[in-house]
Image (cartoon, rainbow, N blue to C red):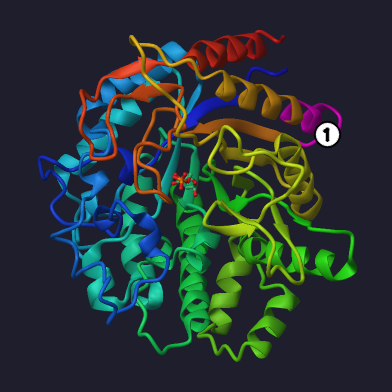
Amino acid sequence: MASDFLWGGAISAAQTEGNQNRMKKQLSNFDILPMDARRLKLVYKDDHNNIFNTYETDHHPSERGIDFYNTYEDDIDLMHELGVNAFRFSISWTRLFPTGEEDVPDASGMNFYRRIVEKLKNYGMEPVVTLSHFEIPVNLIKKYGGWSSRKVIYLYLRYATTVMKEFASSVKYWIPFNEMNMILHIPFIGGGLVFESDENILQREYQAAHYQLIANALTVEIGKKINPDFQFGCMLAAGRTYPYTPKPEDVWAANLNDRNALLFSDVQVRGNYPTYFEYFCKVNKLQLDITSDDLKILSDNTVDFVSFSYYSSACSASKSEGLEHVATNGYQTLKNPYLSNENSVWQNDPIGLRITLNQLYERYEKPMFIVENGIGTTKDKLVSGKVHDSYRIDYLRNHFEELNKARKEDGIPVIGYLMWGVIDLVSVSEGKMSKRYGVVYVDLDDMEQGSNKRYKKDSFYWYHDYIQQQIAGG
Ligand code: BG6
């Protein structure tokens, strides 16, 4: 196997950096994520659960995160020891542009990211940078309704352009938006959207999505002028939807569920809205602000690779009442009787990774990049400095087998594999530390109490050895 394959780990700013010392001068949407993150599915202005009203009384795990702002050097040393040759992290818009409206970035914030990139490069690790990983300055939510406003495109571009210029010669792989399709499931986190209780939610979600798609395309346009070698990826929360039964109605339901995600990559990769979306808008009476200039921007600036997260497949039926549901990434899906979630919060489906890689490659024929995958579990226990996570080793082994089949038997070009939450971090769906993904254990509990020390889990050594074998051509 070629050694230019990227084996790595991935994290995001909001889930790790923390802000205890108030180095970040304003809050982002994620900073106000309460511990019971499920409450954030839909945020209403007049709801008594309104996130702004309860800010003072909620517990906010991301305030400490894993204190990556202060521990990044040791954490990157650990990544080097792990033997990875790539590391995905995100830049916090708010750390650089606290209100989102400044003309110049905060110098100390920029220095922080400069030091991270330098350290990665010194170790020969490829930085993979996400510009917006579930973050938008709170000021832009209050003033413009988050991504509901076209104005935010240009504020985002000021931020994105500044970062791309700063790292013009040191970063090649860029992901302008994390999991864009999440705006349909967790719109406050995905787009800073707060709704009136009587409004047409779909209208606003798809409008905000359109503005993000334009921002994505303009980032590609500007980025290619800064450095034509930059490579841009879409990023979707993927995982093929299976029909619950072979009944044609169930197959159709599964197709429809997949469109929720694929719409976004369809636009980013092919450069136009698919016909099914025009009809979707008609049926749902959506009237979107999409100009002819917008359509040209989309068609002129498509992405270079298809990056995605894969945690599990989903399952749909035409009638799902009375059937058991389970959580998956961002929403509830039908429990698949052939899959287990014995050791993980979400169902475990390694073959689904091969199926999803094939689904996306058949559709787009662009290089694939798995930028998130891993097992989120509450089973990790730290005992005498050790974590015996054999289930994580099994998970990785099984997923890597399917990845190898996709590459070697199906001929799919894959740029790399980045393990999500390679160092434990705050979960988005749970808003807690106790759903852990890492091969590195972080000693913090759900109330963010603990030593914050790092411990290598058994899976750390396993992943290390696996990568070494692969790089050596084994
Ligand atoms: C993806 C996100 O949705 O899944 C990550 O890009 C997130 O930010 C990951 O952490 C796992 O989800 P969760 O809810 O277990 O944190």
Residue situated in front as seen by the camera: 124 or 236: 236
Residue 123 figure quarter = top left
Residue situated in front as seen by the camera: 119 or 370: 370
Q: Which residues are magenta?
A: 403-412
Q: Is residue 100 left or right of residue 404?
A: left
Whether the residue under disc 1 has CB within 8 Å of ligand 1: no
Mainly helix, strand or loop, the magenta region?
helix
Given the current orientation, which residue lies at the most extreme front position?
322
In the rendered image, the vertical position of residue 325 relative to residue 290, given as above or below: above
Q: Is residue 298 left or right of residue 340?
A: left
Q: How many marks?
A: 1
User: Would you name the residue on which mark 1 appears?
Assistant: 411
- Residue 8 at x, y = what percent? 52, 26
In the rendered image, the vertical position of residue 70 relative to residue 281, given as above or below: above
- Residue 238 at x, y = what percent? 63, 51
- Residue 196 at x, y = what percent? 35, 85
In the rendered image, the vertical position of residue 326 relative to residue 267, given as above or below: above
Q: Residue at x 49, y 13 (%)?
A: 458
- Residue 30 at x, y = what percent? 30, 55
Residue situated in front as seen by the camera: 357 or 215: 357
Q: Of the residues shown, which amino acid type is indicated by label 1?
A: Gly
Location of the C terminus (image quadrant): top right
Residue 123 appearing in the image: no
Q: Is residue 288 left or right of residue 40?
A: right
Element marked by disc 1 = loop
Q: Is residue 262 left or right of residue 135?
A: right
How packed mark 1 is, by other alpha carbons closer than 10 Å (few <14, some 14-19, many 20 or more), is few
Q: Residue at x 46, y 80 (%)?
A: 204
Q: Residue at x 32, y 22 (%)?
A: 75
Residue 431 appearing in the image: yes
Q: Tell me if residue 474 is in the magenta stretch.
A: no
